């Protein structure tokens, strides 16, 4: 949990977070006061405020869990839900503290309440002024890129156990002390991520299922009898607080003109019940505490089960995060005006990606007449924190933040901009810290909002200088496939084989392999933009033609002919283009020719041509290892090719027709 989010919370999230806890609390207490005299005994009525407060809570961990399972943590709705849940949970913590003090006062007297209150405040001050600085000191003592010493991790775990015992002695739930201690741990690497990596697997996959099972075993379904006034009252209270919570969420959202489906989905997310509710009901229904009677405990556990089953299904039905990416506008290079500004979003995972990406941008033929606008997105895996982070770095600022995650990226691209002032009209650097399986949301959303025509993604495989595969990152491959599926514009996957630096006085040779189709047309349009005699960039277009298919048979063939016309006539503005036409019978013949020409060029550009069947590639699809590269791209990126020629695989914007609700 990043408490700094509270300072940046917008009005919509603030009002929603406040309303979704206070409104059901007020409705529940009002209902209880009006009905308790005729429906409840004095002992039963005492637990009413506690039960109403538990029904009204919106715990932050529960919302995070649901958003992660639905894979919408990085979506706009997910971000709004996280902010609102953090506001609501902060108020909920305060209410739980008051409820605990009230219970202690009734059981042990006012003097004991003063002692418990003073002890609680002392513990919180210790967390803020002792433990937090100690955690920050540990982070400072850890060299960049090195793991935290194991002794520090063990000390924090010991503190966690001690804080649990202290909170129990203060008459709080056992988890309260460790919860506040957890807030003192700096989120993210190196400390937060180290604790998560060390313990998360065991706690989430072993302890949590056991805990939920034990809580569920406390539910006695035999106690749920509709003939009981007490049970009928609890059902009315549960329905009233749930309905009030939904309405409280909807009012500020609809007032801010959010679509009704999205507002309903967010209301369901904030009304979701999970393991935190289970722990509260279980603790306060325990024999030693006995604030919640067995009937109410059983009914509450059943209600949690029903809520946790239905809510995710309804949210998935109401909210489709990919809807906003539907291709209603043409955002690709082919439909960009010839001398218009070209907007490119490039993604960086690690410093090794920077030289190749910069070389590609330098080769993009940017001039004062047809400039580039470049958006750089540094993607960092989210470990050790619950909330994804999106940072916008202003390139014109001379000072860097002390906690800058992307200092190397900022420096490298600011230098690139200084070296290309005429051709770069704008360059902005962004940092996204999020779970790898949701990173495609950050990429696609930024491309959508910045009206990018092309997204450039690094390939997930890294080669050493001697041509062998050095490493693979399956998370990056998943990201690339997600972007290819959802992107609101064209996408290029850049396969870096190590040739990223070219001497200034030598030429840069680019070859475009053309077979036909929309992806190849997009790739050729980009390649023609690169042709530039002033920058010593030479372009060769190799057109593979299937034997007996020289005639124009359909609209696709006509578009192929039009995009190739100026290449055949060598009438491409900016530079000289070599056109080569190869007649082939099948895929193996195409592969043989491609293998013979790989080492002649610095960069090869191809279209992805996913699921396109043609004679030129017949017999090759069965050997394709990476479908995201297409057949020809996969052939060029194969480990069998001991080459240093890089490859750019281009997919034109996918026109998806989706109904907007």
Image (cartoon, helix red, strand yellow):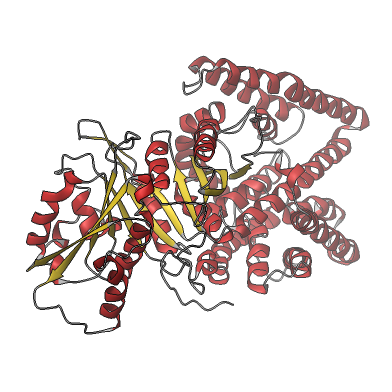
Q: Which quadrant is the N terminus positioned in?
A: top right
Can residue 232 be seen here? The reply is no
Which residue of the protein is positioned furthest toward the right in this rendering? Answer: 110
Query: In this figure, what is the number of numbered marks?
Result: 0
Depth check, front residue: 12 or 569: 569
Q: Residue 40's spot in the image, x, y percent? A: 84, 61
Image: 77 above or below 146: below
Locate residue 558 relative to residue 34 in the image: left or right.
Answer: left
Residue 304 shown left or right of residue 38 in the figure: left
User: How far across and down, in percent of the image, does residue 230 sit?
Assistant: 76, 63
| Quadrant of the image occupied by residue 497 | top left
Q: Determine which quarter of the picture holds residue 599.
A: top left
Q: Quadrant of the C terminus?
A: bottom right
Q: Can you say whether 428 is above or below 129 in the image?
A: below
Q: Is residue 517 left or right of residue 489?
A: left
Residue in the image at 50% along x and 16% along y: 149
Q: Nearer the viewer, residue 562 or 137?
A: 562
Residue at the spot 60% in from the left edge and 62% down from the top edge: 307
| Residue at the extreme bottom | 553
Relative to 411, residue 82 above or below: below
Give residue 542's position: percent from left, percent from top: 20, 60
Above or below residue 423? Residue 24 is below
């Amino acid at each position: 949990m990043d408490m700094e989010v509270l300072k940046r919370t917008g009005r919509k999230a603030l009002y929603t977070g406040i309303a979704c806890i206070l409104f059901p609390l007020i409705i529940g207490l009002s209902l209880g006061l009006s009905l308790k005299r005729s429906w409840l005994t004095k002992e039963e009525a005492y637990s009413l405020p506690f039960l109403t407060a538990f029904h009204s809570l919106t715990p932050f961990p529960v919302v995070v869990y649901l958003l992660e399972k639905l894979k919408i943590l990085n979506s706009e709705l997910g971000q709004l839900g996280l902010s609102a849940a953090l506001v609501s949970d902060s108020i909920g913590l305060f209410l739980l503290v008051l409820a605990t003090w009230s219970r202690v006062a009734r059981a042990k007297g006012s003097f004991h309440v003063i002692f418990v209150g003073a002890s609680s405040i002392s513990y919180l001050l210790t967390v803020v002024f002792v433990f937090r600085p100690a955690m920050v000191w540990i982070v400072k003592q850890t060299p960049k890129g090195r793991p935290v010493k194991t002794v520090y991790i063990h000390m924090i775990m010991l503190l966690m156990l001690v804080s649990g015992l202290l909170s129990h002695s203060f008459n709080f739930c056992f988890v309260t002390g460790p919860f506040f201690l957890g807030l003192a741990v700096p989120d993210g690497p190196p400390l937060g991520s180290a604790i998560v990596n060390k313990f998360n697997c065991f706690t989430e996959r072993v302890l949590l299922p056991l805990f939920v099972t034990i809580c569920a075993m406390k539910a006695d379904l035999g106690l749920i009898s509709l003939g009981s006034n007490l049970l009928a009252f609890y059902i009315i209270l549960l329905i009233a607080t749930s309905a009030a919570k939904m309405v409280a969420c909807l009012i500020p959202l609809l007032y801010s003109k959010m679509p009704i489906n999205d507002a309903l989905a967010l209301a369901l997310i904030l009304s979701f019940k999970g393991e935190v509710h289970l722990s509260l009901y279980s603790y306060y229904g325990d024999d030693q505490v006995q604030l919640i009677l067995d009937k109410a405990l059983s009914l509450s556990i059943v209600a949690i089960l029903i809520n946790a089953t239905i809510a995710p299904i309804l949210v998935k039905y109401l909210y489709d995060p990919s809807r906003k990416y539907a291709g209603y506008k043409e955002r690709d290079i082919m439909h960009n005006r010839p001398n218009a500004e070209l907007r490119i979003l490039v993604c960086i995972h690690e410093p090794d990606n920077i030289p190749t990406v910069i070389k590609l941008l330098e080769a993009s033929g940017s001039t004062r007449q047809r400039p580039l606008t470049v958006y750089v997105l540094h993607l960092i895996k989210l470990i050790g924190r619950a909330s994804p982070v999106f940072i916008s770095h202003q390139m014109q600022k001379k000072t860097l933040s002390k906690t800058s995650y992307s200092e190397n990226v900022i420096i490298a691209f600011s230098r690139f901009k200084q070296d290309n002032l005429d051709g770069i009209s704008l360059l902005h650097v962004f940092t996204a810290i999020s779970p790898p399986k949701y990173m495609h949301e950050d990429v696609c959303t930024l491309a959508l909002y910045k009206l990018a025509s092309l997204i450039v993604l690094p390939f997930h495989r890294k080669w050493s200088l001697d041509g062998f595969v050095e490493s693979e990152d399956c998370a990056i491959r998943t990201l690339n496939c997600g972007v290819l599926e959802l992107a609101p514009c064209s996408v290029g996957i850049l396969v870096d084989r190590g040739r990223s630096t070219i001497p200034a006085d030598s030429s840069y040779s680019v070859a475009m392999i053309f077979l036909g189709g929309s992806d190849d047309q997009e790739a050729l349009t980009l390649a023609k933009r690169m042709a530039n005699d002033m920058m010593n960039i030479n372009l060769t277009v190799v057109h593979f033609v299937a034997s007996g298919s020289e005639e124009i048979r359909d609209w696709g063939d006509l578009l192929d002919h039009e995009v190739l016309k100026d290449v055949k006539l060598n009438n491409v503005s900016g530079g000289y283009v070599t056109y080569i036409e190869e007649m082939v019978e099948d895929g193996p013949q195409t592969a043989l020719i491609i293998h013979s020409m790989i080492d002649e060029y610095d960069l090869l550009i191809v279209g992805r041509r996913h699921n396109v069947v043609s004679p030129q590639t017949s017999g090759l699809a069965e050997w394709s290892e990476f479908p995201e590269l297409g057949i020809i791209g996969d052939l060029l990126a194969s480990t069998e090719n001991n080459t240093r020629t890089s490859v750019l695989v281009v997919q034109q914007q996918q026109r998806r027709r989706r109904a907007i609700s």
